[in-house]
Image: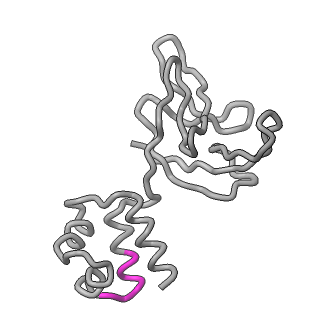
Amino acid sequence: MKKIKLYLHSHFDFFKECFVDGWSLIEDGAYREEFFILPDGFYIDLVDGDPAIIEREDGGDMIRDIITLNGRPYIATAGYNLALEMTTEKEPAQEITEIREKLEMKKVEFAAELGIPIRTLEDWESGNRVPPVYLVKLIRFWAENK
């Protein structure tokens, strides 16, 4: 499993006569960045100086486009679009532990603040259970604005 960073850009679509968002591997002009899991069978390489997603195929590797449907990034492959799964930069267990330690809170205090059982927090921090990505992001947002 490899993590990749994608960047969200806004551009004017002259056909639709409005601004639309699109995910890309290129950072310039982006207003948001997120981490996603690159599925097996794909890798990133430079093509004409820009990063591109390449699919490994028996007949030769193929360059694939990133398309955006309903705000979500997909890899456009031959015959279907493959949704990319969002993740965090660090492993959730490490991220949750770092947030708690940065706030200088004991596990009991942190769990109480989040309104979750202490056992759930212990399972997250030990890696026995993995919290959903959106929850890790909400906890990070809460901690940054506390």
Quick one: 146 or 5, which is closer to the camera?
Answer: 146
Residue at horizontal 35%, vertical 62%?
Answer: 92
Vertical placement of residue 61 versus 35, above or below: above
Task: Say if the magenta span includes residue 49.
Answer: no
Tally the marks.
0
Image location (x, y in percent) of residue 98: 38, 75
Location of residue 105 (image quadrant): bottom left
Which quadrant is the N terminus positioned in? Answer: top left
Q: Is residue 44 above or below residue 59?
A: below
Q: Given the current orientation, which residue lies at the most extreme front position?
A: 17
Depth order, front residue of 91/121: 121
Position of residue 101 measured from the top left corner of the image (x, y, whole percent):
36, 82
**Magenta stretch in the rendered image:** 98-105
- Vertical placement of residue 137 versus 59, above or below: below
Q: Residue placed at 51% from the left, 11% from the top?
A: 59
**Is residue 104 within the magenta segment?**
yes
Query: Is 116 on the left or on the right of 30, as rendered?
Result: left
What is the image's colouring? one colour
Instruction: Kindly report the secondary structure that dominates the magenta region of the rendered protein.
Output: helix
Q: Quadrant of residue 134?
A: bottom left
Q: Residue at x 35, y 80 (%)?
A: 100
Side (left or right) of 67 relative to 133 = right
Q: Outermost residue toward the top?
A: 59
Q: Residue 71: where, in percent of width, then height?
A: 57, 46
